[in-house]
Image (cartoon, rainbow, N blue to C red):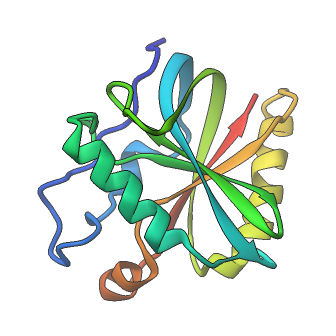
Amino acid sequence: MQTNVLPQIDMSDIPTGCCPRFQPEGWEGQDLHFQDKRFLRATTLSAMHIPLNMGRVFGRVQAAIEQQGAALDSGNFVMTLESSPWGAEHYFAVARDVEGEQMISLTGDYMTKVFEGPFRDAGKWHEAMLDAAREAGKEPGKVYFFYTTCPKCAKVYGQNYVVGLVEV
């Protein structure tokens, strides 16, 4: 069992110049184990789960990560927790602390499942993650989502992959 290891994302396959083309094979049915894994925590505002300032927040955070050399070699990985209909928490995996940003460490075990479809299915995906944990004989905790591409890139690629992660 490897700790703090994420499946690779091919950062060389970016025909849109924005988000890399996502390959789900390495992400489906994985057990991830984090021990004091470093993340940059950022929050966004929402109106009934519709993000209002995500582009601005993600742009600022990604720029800080790049400028300070904190990007992961395995590619960008952001876990999103819908904390309420009015906001979300985003956890950007980083190689080192990013000055001027809120840094946290996460420890825990997570099961993954890959979904494909419109963002409006997130409620169904959330329930599917809880069910998957229970079916594995585990008590589900928080459910996070890794939105692998922005809506514009998902449209270009013709697929909208989202990775669910349930804390177990």
- Foreground residue, 147 or 86? 86
Rendered residue at 48%/11% (across/down): 1
Q: Quadrant of residue 21?
A: bottom left
Give percent across and percent down for residue 152: 38, 85
Rendered residue at 83%/46% (across/down): 130
Horizontal side of residue 106 vs 74, given as left or right: right
In the rendered image, the vertical position of residue 90 relative to residue 153, given as above or below: above
Rendered residue at 64%/31% (across/down): 110
Give percent across and percent down for residue 25: 38, 50
Q: Quadrant of residue 74?
A: top left
Horizontal side of residue 155 vs 140, given as left or right: left
- Foreground residue, 104 or 164? 104
Q: Quadrant of residue 49?
A: bottom right
Give percent across and percent down for residue 167: 73, 33
In the rendered image, the vertical position of residue 94 relative to residue 115, given as above or below: above
Horizontal side of residue 15 vs 82, given as left or right: left
In the rendered image, the vertical position of residue 93 relative to residue 76, given as above or below: above
Query: Where the C terminus falls, by quadrant?
Result: top right
